[in-house]
Image: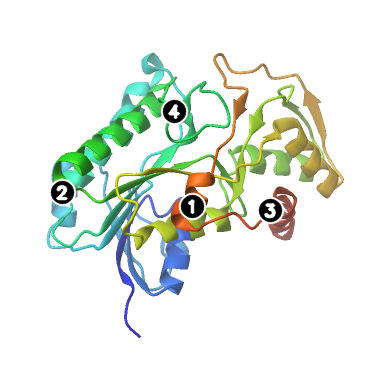
Amino acid sequence: MEKSGRLLIVGGTGFIGRNVAIEAVNRRFQVSIISKNNCPKLKQVKGIEYIAVDITKKKDLLIKLKGKLFDYVLNLGGYVNHANLSNGGDEVFNVHFNGTKNLVNYIDKSNLKAFIQIGSSDEYGDGVAPQNESQRELPISPYSFAKTASTHFLQMLHRTEDFPVVILRLFLVYGPKQDGNRFIPSIIEGCLNNDKFPVSQGGQLRDFCYIDDVVSGILATLTNNNIKGEIINLASGKPVTIREVVEKIIKITGQGVAEFGKIPYRVGENMALYADNSKAKELLGWRPSVTLSQGIFKTVTSYQKKT
C-alpha cells in the first residue's frame, strides 16, 4: 500500500504527540519523532523513527535534520509552564519561540506541504468568551507570549514567503495516559486514593476536549490545502465549570473528597476560557464526537485498570 506521506512530529513522545503518532502510523504515514531526550525502547512504537535533539540547540538540530525530507511537520515542542519571566519564564520563551524558529530554519522546505503549529488557548489571555480566532491576543505569561509570538512569526512567513503553516489553538485536552500532574489525572488519582484534596472554588468555565477528537482534528489539517495561514480553535466549544468536572469524577469513582476553596484563583486568571469552534467545523469538517461524560468515564476506567 502507498504511504500517506512523511510526517515529523516534534514533541512526539508527549501525551498528544504519541497519540497522533500512533494514529498516523495506522493511516500509513511514515512517521519520525523529535524529542529532547532518548525515548526508552519499551515506549517506542514500531515503525517510527526516533530522533533525540534539543530544538533550541541550532547546531545539533542542523546535524540531526541533515538529509531528511518531510511532507508534513507537526510542532508540539515545548511544555506548558506559567512561570513569570523572573522565575524561569525566559527559558520557556526560548523553547517555544526560538525552538520554533530553529525548526523553520533547519527543516528542508523543498517538499514541505504543511507545517502545523500547536498553539494554546492561553494566547487569548483574558479575552471575552467564547474566544474566537479574530480576537486580539492578550498573553499574560512568557509561555502564552511565546505561543503568540510564534503565531505571528509563522503567519508573517506565510504572507511573505508562502510558508504552508496552519496554527491550531488547543484548549484543555485530556484522556488516558496523560501526565499525572495535569488537572483531570490529578483529580482522578486523588479520588482513586480516596483522598481529601484541595481545589479552587471551581467557578472557572473551561473547555475540555477528549484526546481522540483532538487527534482527528490535527490529522484533518495535514492534507487540507485551503487553510494555509489560518488560526483554528480545536476544542469542544462547550463550557463547563471546574467544579462540575471534579464532581463528575467523584461520582464516577465513588470516592474522594474535594475541598473546594482551599486553593485561591490564580492572579489574572480568565474565569471564562472556552472556544468558538465554528471555524474548525466549517474549514475542517471536524466536530468533537466524545462528550465530557463519556471522555471522563473512559479516562477514569483506564486509571482503574492500572490499579
Return the residue nearer the eye: 139 or 306. Answer: 139
Q: Is residue 276 above or below residue 286?
A: above
Q: Earlier in the sequence, mark 2 or mark 4?
A: 2
Disc 2 vs disc 1: Cβ atoms closer than 8 Å? Answer: no
Q: CA distance from mark 2 to mark 4?
A: 31 Å
| Residue marked by disc 3 | 295
Looking at numbered disc 2 in the image, what kind of residue is underneath it?
Tyr
Disc 3 vs disc 1: Cβ atoms closer than 8 Å? Answer: no
Looking at numbered disc 3 in the image, what kind of residue is underneath it?
Gly
Give the quarter of the image for residue 194: top right
Residue at image coords 72%, 60%: 305
Crowding at mark 4 (Cα within 10 Å: few <14, some 14-19, many 20+): few
List x then y, in percent, for residue 59.
13, 44
Q: Earlier in the sequence, mark 3 or mark 2?
A: 2
| Residue marked by disc 2 | 106
| Residue marked by disc 4 | 135
Q: CA distance from mark 2 to mark 1?
A: 33 Å
Q: Is residue 48 visible?
A: yes
Q: CA distance from mark 1 to mark 4?
A: 18 Å
Q: CA distance from mark 3 to mark 2?
A: 38 Å
Disc 1 vs disc 4: Cβ atoms closer than 8 Å? Answer: no
Looking at numbered disc 4 in the image, what kind of residue is underneath it?
Gln
Give the quarter of the image for residue 250: top right
**In the image, is 186 to the left or to the right of 84?**
right
Q: Earlier in the sequence, mark 3 or mark 1?
A: 1
Q: Which mark is residue 282?
A: 1
Q: Nearer the viewer, mark 3 or mark 1?
A: 1
Please tell me whether mark 3 sits on a helix, a strand or a loop.
Answer: helix
Q: Is residue 12 above or below residue 78?
A: below
Q: Earlier in the sequence, mark 2 or mark 1?
A: 2
